Every structure is written in structure tokens, then in C-alpha cells.
Amino acid sequence: MTKIALVGEAWGEAEERERAPFVGAAGYQLNSLLKDAGIPRYECFLTNVFNLRPKPTNKIDNLCAKKADVRHNLPALRPGHYIRDEFLPELDRLYREIGALRPNLVVALGGTASWALLHDSRITKLRGAVATSTVLPGQKVLPTFHPSYILQGSYDQRPVVVLDLLKAKREAEFPEVRRPHRTIYIEPLLSEIEWFINTFIMPSKCISVDIETVERIITCIGFSPSKEIAMVIPFRDLRKPSKTYWGSLDAEVKAWALVRKILDLPIPKVFQNGLYDMHFLWKIYGIRPRAVEHDTMLLHHALQPESQKSLDFLGSVYTDEAAWKLVMRSKNKSTIKREE
């Protein structure tokens, strides 16, 4: 059984001559990437969205037209560029290939492959996050950059692709999309914050902390004593006329007192880009977090000093979360359930 299918964009000159995918310069780069990730190329199925060479140049724009000149309802490959109707049979051929193979994972190499399988070509936002195909029910897809992107001057992204392929190797062991299960409490009452502290924070061995800011204001602060549970304490709410969540100064002061209580506990704490968060808490709010032991950004830097260090990047590499910055936020308010 083939566990991994690698889908590229289209043929280049060498691919057109050999009538096979990834036999040119991009193919050599792909071989190197797969080797670094410990994935044997011969164990993968390789194909392209378009088994043809865009003419007169290799640019995929040569296969595109304006919206007014196409009859299909597919999304744009990129703003203002829609695949011409005569090339749609190539998509059908791709879907038949993958449908017949049913690999555990399809690695979408580049924006065109992501567009074909996920109807979204924003590869810089999608890469590294496993998703379910919008056109092949139940098919797991992991987007990453195309090897030619590295060759065209973005060599600094090569380690990122290796990290994505290492994740692909893990994900290829099973066919389903596995998301972590957790409970996140939002929009709490003061009594619910106290309940969360007593029930989950106090017995914990470590607390993860993260703040969100706008200008010189903390809009919310999150606490997680384990990977299964967390609470977000909000302070700014643009839905309310006052723009504040708590509604009264007295309630907000009490909320900050509870935040200060958590941050002053001797329980070890973990931040992301903690120097910023701790400086902000101290300078603006006079809160000095106690027992801060780790910073996920610095820990990642120690492991991968050449790669990005933002929280969404770390999430794409180390977690099974979706690309959360693209996920629609639920409008439903959470309800805290307690056992009586």
C-alpha cells in the first residue's frame, strides 16, 4: 500500500521530455528533501495537478483566464486568475488517480496543489497543517512549499519543508485527521475564574500563559494547566458600548486580582515570546510573573535556529491543530459545565 502521494503543479521542460513528474531540477531538490525527512521516494506516488507544460513559459498563469472567460465555479487560483475550462480534465484525472490509490496522506506541494485539493492556494498560511480535502471526501492533505520555490530564491524555506515532510511521515501512518481534544473556557464570570483556579490551576505542575495585546492594552490572557484544558480571561470586548468585557471598574479590578494571583503562584510557568509578555505585564500593569521557567519560542530556537518562531509556525510544526488563523471563530458562547 502506498501511504504518501506527492502532488506538484505542472510539468517543466525535463518532465515534458520524460513525460514523468519530478525528473528535473525540482525533482532533484525533492529527492534531497525526502532524504532529509527519512521518506524513501520509491515508496511515494508522484503526480501533478497538470500533467502538461504551461506554454510559452512554465508559469501556471499561462493556464489561466479572467473570471468572465470561464464557465466553471471553481475559486481563483490566485486573485484574478482562473483555470481555463479546457484544462479542467486534468483535475478529473488527478482526482481519479488519488481516488484509486487512497493514500493515507496527500502532500500538496505548492499553492496550485493546495488549490486543487483544498480550494485554497494560500500556501504560506496553509503549510504544515493537516486538512481534509474539499473535493475528495475523507482524504487527508498536508500542504507545503513546492521544491521549485526553494530553487527560485527561497532557500531559507528549505528547513521548513523538511519539518513539514517529517510531519507528513508521521501523519502517513494513519488515514484519518486526528485533532487534539480539549476544553477551552471563554467569557467567564468572576466566580468561574475562581472555580478554574481552585479546580485546575492549584493542583497543576505547570501553567502555560499567553497574552494578546492591542497598543498598550491586554485584550485577553489565557491560562492552561494541561494540554486538555484552558481558560481565556477577556478584558476588551468590542461588542459592548464601553469596549470592556467586565462592564464595571470594580469587576475588572477583581478580574485582574485573580490574574495576579495565578501569575504569583510558585507553580512553574511557560510563555511564548515570554520576554515581551513579562515586560508588558510589568511595565503596563505592574504584575511580575513568578516562577517562569520556559519559553516555547526559545526552546524551538534551540532545536531549529534557522526557522520561524511565531506561535502559528510552532503550531504547524509541533501540533495536530488546523491552520487556526484561517478557522472561523464560533459565535457561540461557551458554557462551563460542572459536576454537582
Image: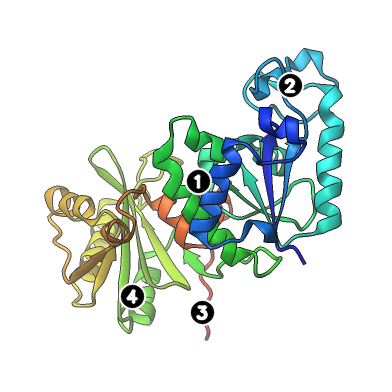
The kind of residue tagged 1 is Lys
Q: Residue 235: horizontal and vertical position, in percent?
A: 33, 51
Q: Earlier in the sequence, mark 3 or mark 1?
A: 1
Tag of residue 63: 2
Q: Earlier in the sequence, mark 2 or mark 4?
A: 2
Image-quadrant location for residue 49: top right
Q: Residue at x 79, y 46 (%)?
A: 135
Q: Are marks 2 and 4 in contact (CB under 8 Å)?
A: no
Which residue corresponds to mark 4?
Answer: 197
Task: Name the secondary structure under disc 3.
Answer: loop
The residue closer to the viewer here, 120 or 34, is 34
Q: Residues within 10 Å of mark 1 (few under 14, many from 20)?
A: few
In the displayed structure image, the side of residue 135 where residue 167 appears, left or right? left
Q: Report if residue 283 is visible in the image.
A: yes
Label 1, label 4: how far apart the Cα atoms are: 28 Å
Q: Earlier in the sequence, mark 3 or mark 4?
A: 4
Q: Residue at x 81, y 43 (%)?
A: 94
Which residue corresponds to mark 1?
Answer: 325
The kind of residue tagged 4 is Ile
Label 2, label 1: how far apart the Cα atoms are: 30 Å
Q: Residue 143: horizontal and vertical position, in percent?
A: 60, 47
Circle nearer the viewer, 2 or 4: 2
Circle nearer the viewer, 3 or 4: 4
Label 2, label 3: how far apart the Cα atoms are: 57 Å
Image-quadrant location for residue 206: bottom left
Tag of residue 338: 3
Q: Are marks 2 and 3 in contact (CB under 8 Å)?
A: no
Circle nearer the viewer, 3 or 1: 1
Tag of residue 73: none
Circle nearer the viewer, 2 or 3: 2
Q: Residue 72: horizontal and vertical position, in percent?
A: 84, 26
